[in-house]
DNA sequence: TCTTGCACCTCTAGCCGCTAGAGGATGTAG
DNA sequence: CTACATCCTCTAGCGGCTAGAGGTGCAAGA
């Protein structure tokens, strides 16, 4: 088994060095063995765990959700209903967020299009911001 | 001119009391006059400013962008090119965010659909998280 | 008048998920 | 042996609030 420094682990996983230490500090990553000189030394299993964490973060899972998913992964005989529920909840969040961003986009487009590029006292951007009544109320 | 307590200002603007004090502390809102007993006393202009800030926050503008927009609003003879640019930048951000969330949504749907609701060692959710190679690479 | 009880005040600390920097030790190449 | 990169720990900061402690102000009821 090849031992690896934190810097190499960072390069291979795409997770920054301080972030790796941070994940250790909050218990997402187990404390690795140390070299004679007290330097962290990672094994392939740690790299896999790091990749898992990174991917989950990219998908927007919160650290607590990832902690739960990792616990599930550690015990493969459990039902995967919990993992399913976590992923579904995240999916619902994402759908919700997309809907609200689309509403925002529409409103921003109206603001930008309506701007006559003149002076501020006739600027649609400023006007709309000052008066919520002028917009579609789609965002809440 | 009717003076108003922070609580009323909060109710009328929809901005929470501590948040109003926070906005004052970072200089978004001017320091209001105080009553004999040292309590903040707001005027209609403050309410308008609060509404502006709240609306801009709902649209996802950062505090520094709002600060810039408020400065523009305070001097109506300026060109509105800056306001326009700020709004356009925000629009680009939102569009970008929507695109990336749609990619995430697709990936989450694949994960959730593929889950056979059995045990963790065959759970598609866990598998996909563990192996980035299994997904569409659309998110980055 | 007194007291209840809410709203207000200031101040500090905490949330999330990192990121940055100080100040020092270790490891490696020339 | 000397550079120099990389590692170590520790503390503080980011944004945009939010929560709580511990105290004061104020209006209305008994």
Image (tube, coloured by chain):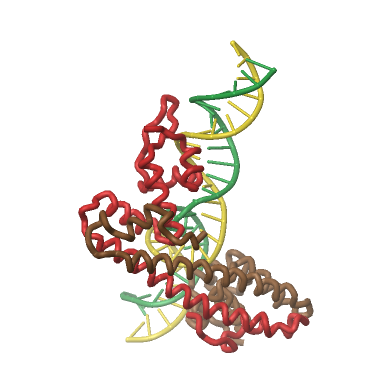
Chain colours: A brown, B red, C yellow, D green
Q: Residue at x 75, y 75 (%)?
A: A81
Q: Residue at x 40, y 70 (%)?
A: B93
C5 sits left or right of B32 in the view? right
The picture places residue B85, in percent across and down from the top left corner, at 29, 66
Q: Is residue A47 visible?
A: no
Q: Residue at x 25, y 60 (%)?
A: B80
Residue B137 position (above or below residue B72): below
Picture quadrant where residue B83 is located = bottom left
Picture quadrant where residue A52 is located = bottom right
User: Which is nearer the eye, A107 or B55?
Assistant: A107
B134 sits left or right of D25 in the view? right
Q: Is residue A68 visible?
A: yes
The picture places residue B112, in percent across and down from the top left corner, at 67, 80
Residue A32 position (above or below residue B75): below
User: Which is nearer the eye, A81 or A72?
Assistant: A81
Q: Residue at x 48, y 73 (%)?
A: A17
Residue B105 position (above or below residue D9): below
User: Which is nearer the eye, C29 or B1?
Assistant: B1
The picture places residue A56, in percent across and down from the top left corner, at 58, 75
Q: Quadrant of the N terminus of chain A?
A: bottom right
Report the label total.
0
B105 sits left or right of A102 in the view? right
The picture places residue A136, in percent across and down from the top left corner, at 46, 61
């Amino acid at each position: 088994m090849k031992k690896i420094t934190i810097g190499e682990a960072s390069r291979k996983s795409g997770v920054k060095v301080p972030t790796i230490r941070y994940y250790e500090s909050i218990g997402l990553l187990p404390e690795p063995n140390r070299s004679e000189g007290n330097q962290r030394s990672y094994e392939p299993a740690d790299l896999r765990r790091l990749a898992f964490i990174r991917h989950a973060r990219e998908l927007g899972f919160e650290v607590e959700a990832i902690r739960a998913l990792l616990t599930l992964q550690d015990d493969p005989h459990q039902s995967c209903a919990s993992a399913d529920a976590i992923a579904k909840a995240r999916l619902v969040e994402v759908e919700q967020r997309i809907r609200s961003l689309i509403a925002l986009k529409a409103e921003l487009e109206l603001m930008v299009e309506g701007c006559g590029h003149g002076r501020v006292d006739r600027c649609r951007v400023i006007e709309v911001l000052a008066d919520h009544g002028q917009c579609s109320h789609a965002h809440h």
